[in-house]
Amino acid sequence: MTKPNHIRLAGPTRLAAVPSQGKAVTLPLGAGSTPPADQPQSSVAVSASSGRPATPPDALMRFVELEIEARQCADLDKLRLAIVNATARLVDYDQAFLIEPGLAGGWTITRASSLAKFDRHAPVPSAIGRWLGHAENARSLAKGEIKQVDLDRDCAEWGIDVAPFAFPKGLWIPLRRRDGNVVAGLLALRSEAWPAAAVVLLTPLAGAYAHAWEALMPQAATRSTRARRFVSKRRLALALAVVVAVAAVIPVPMSALAPAEIVAATPSLVTAPIDGVVGEILLPPGSWIARGQPVLKLVDIKLRSDVEVAHRNLAVAQANYFRVVQSSTATQKNLQELATTRAEYDVSQAELRYAEQLLSRAVVTAPTSGLLIYSARSDLIGKPVRVGERLMEIGDPEHTEIKIELPVSDAVALEPGGAVALFLDGDPMQAIRGTITRVSYRPALSAQQQLVYRVFASFTSQQARSIGLRGVARVSSADVPLGLYLFRRPISALRQWIGL
């Protein structure tokens, strides 16, 4: 039998490799490494089978250095930087990118050579990202085989519209774990084609990188990597669609939020008895007032003048009437004027009584006992009012209810007996339960000049609530599907837009 040919390296029998810590490590090359006496020291060994020059000793030394550096990395981040930067000492390339599997499938660029940080939206990383995202390319990269790629040719064949690459010749070097899964990959780029020797050198180095990567990867990260591989974009979208479809038919109560206020259940109104101007408020808001007690006074200057004029007119009519009576009694003359003067006298008396009644109404009294409710004295003093105009309220603090102003745009089908939850501004985490008692038939303008439906609700508990407290109330009606509850407004707007 013919003995197999061996590759012999010219040079000394031991190679010195300098690791990252700076200590010299002497590595034996094995028996038979000493060159024969008839071969010069400077010659290069040649493979008998191929006739090509064998791997030079300095390349083996760099390989060992890179392997030692990879195994001495303290964490994955340092290992990533070593892979994209230190590998250039073994094979020459212009630029390199470290690529890792994404969370929802696909590939993501995580490191770039010679850069501590890089912008993924820069032209070159963005173009490589589009190249990585192609379906045919993504499947081939996950096989875990070292392969040469031509970025310009692939982009042209797959219809990816990108600018020509400065370094289109790439070498894909996957890092495979022991279970066969690819945890990362190095994409080394250069302007010229890759020699076959580069693949020979990088294949064992990729195994060393993968072994160091797996050793530095925490167990939780390994499980999360398996989960990321299991969860693809299609599976995630399908699961999300199923969840949305199931949730859309879940029945939930139709509800709406609206501003609310605690008001007296049966308030008594203090209204203007005559036309006039508010002159004085006798009691501050929130005071307890008894029935018949004066509340406010209207300006009575004209009323007093009218009473004085009525007195004078009455005196004139009375004197004229007595004169006619005396004259007709003594001489039997002017009897026809007696009825006229009597009527004028009666009219003057009626005018006086009317003027006195108006003057007495200038002081407004409370119709019932209770709590005096109005905004502020400054809002009423000097205000011109007309007969019947509402000025104040008098309410019983022991009998209160909830008044809700529901905007027309949020109006839902409400009926007496519906549930109400009131959240006061002073205690927004505590819900006060109530029951709808009545709903206005037509909307009315609120103080903010907005059309609202007024909804009144009684408290479920008998606890007394302070009049005037404000908050937000949630009113509920019949159950509807969750999809309708969430998209009620968009559906309403769409129907108005398309005219259905």
Image (tube, rainbow, N blue to C red):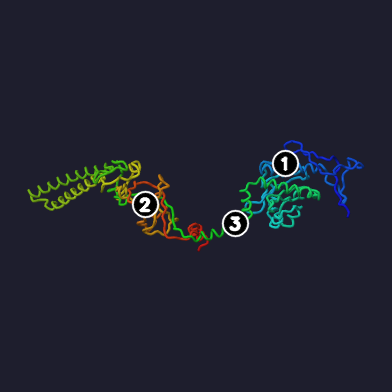
Q: Is residue 421 left or right of residue 95?
A: left
Look at the numbered discs 2 and 1 and tell me whether their residues touch, using CB distance below 8 Å: no
Hey, what amino acid is under mark 2? Lys
Disc ID at residue 69: 1
| Quarter where residue 372 is shown | top left
Tell me which label, 3 or 1, sits earlier in the chain. Answer: 1
Hey, what amino acid is under mark 3? Leu
Report the Cα–Cα distance between label 3 and label 1.
Answer: 39 Å
Front residue of 421/355: it is 421
Tell me which label, 2 or 1, sits earlier in the chain. Answer: 1
Disc ID at residue 236: 3
Q: Callout 1: helix, strand or loop?
A: helix
Residue 2 in view of the camera:
yes
**Are there few (<14), some (14-19), or many (20+) residues within 10 Å of tag 2?**
many
- The picture places residue 93, in percent across and down from the top left corner, at 77, 45
Q: Which residue is mark 2?
A: 403
Front residue of 117/330: it is 117
